[in-house]
Image: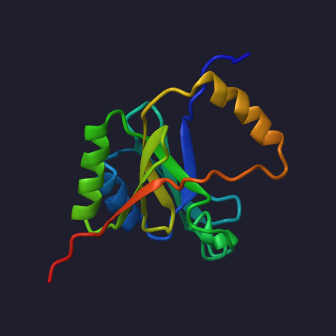
Amino acid sequence: MLGAAMGFHHLALVTRDAKATHDFYTEAMGFHLAKVEVGPTPEGGWAKHIFYETGDASMIAFWELHDDSIPEPKSAIAQDLGLPTWTNHVAFTAHDRGELDRNRERWVSLGHDVLEVDHEWCVSIYTLDPNGIMVEFCLTTRAFTAEEVDRASQLLQDPAPELPGAKPVTKVYRAATSD
């Protein structure tokens, strides 16, 4: 039985370059700067906690650290752990195909390569932010069937599930370049 729906208030990550992060999340993502908190760190330095509204009552936030006792931040949430870029990533909702396409076109026009994947139940577009974090806009295209929901439990428990035969349809959109 499901409880009350619970969304994120915010997701907090570290940034290596606050200006590049700000430019990306306001221009490429279309988010709005909402709040910046400044305060001391427990280790004796200081930090900025920078919040961006994502448009659905949730936020993404970034820490800009100024503390000599903290090592240089590693912000690529997958690669810095030795994982492929596509594993740890942040996905945001696209509400319709037009919104997904507008986001893709904006990314490309701002110089970002974009991968689009049709997962059959959703369509996603992906690019990297200045911190090496893969970000995604995802459009759900249909509800899960009762069979898929039942099969999810079986697949979760299966130590060696059979792989699907068909691969998802993918498209790559290259960043606009000025020659």
Question: Residue 17 falls in which quadrant of the image?
Answer: bottom left
Image location (x, y in percent) of residue 47: 55, 60
Name the residue located 63 percent from the left edge and 76 percent from the top edge: 68
Please say whether residue 27 is visible from this viewpoint: no
Name the residue located 49 percent from the left edge and 60 percent from the top edge: 134
Q: Nearer the viewer, residue 179 or 159?
A: 159
Image location (x, y in percent) of residue 176: 21, 70
**74 left or right, relative to 94:** right
- Above or below, comparing residue 32 to residue 135 in the picture: above
Q: How is the image coloured?
A: rainbow
Marks counted in the figure total 0
Image location (x, y in percent) of residue 157: 83, 40
Image location (x, y in percent) of residue 130: 43, 68
Q: Nearer the viewer, residue 92 or 52?
A: 92
Question: Residue 94 falls in which quadrant of the image?
Answer: top left
**153 left or right, relative to 32:** right
* Direction bottom: furthest residue: 179
Q: Quadrant of the N terminus?
A: top right
- Above or below, comparing residue 152 to residue 17 in the picture: above
Name the residue located 70 percent from the left edge and 58 percent from the top edge: 42
Q: Nearer the viewer, residue 11 or 121?
A: 121
Question: Residue 106 falls in which quadrant of the image?
Answer: bottom left
**45 left or right, relative to 103:** right
Please say whether residue 124 is visible from this viewpoint: yes
Name the residue located 85 percent from the left edge and 50 percent from the top edge: 159
Q: Quadrant of the C terminus?
A: bottom left
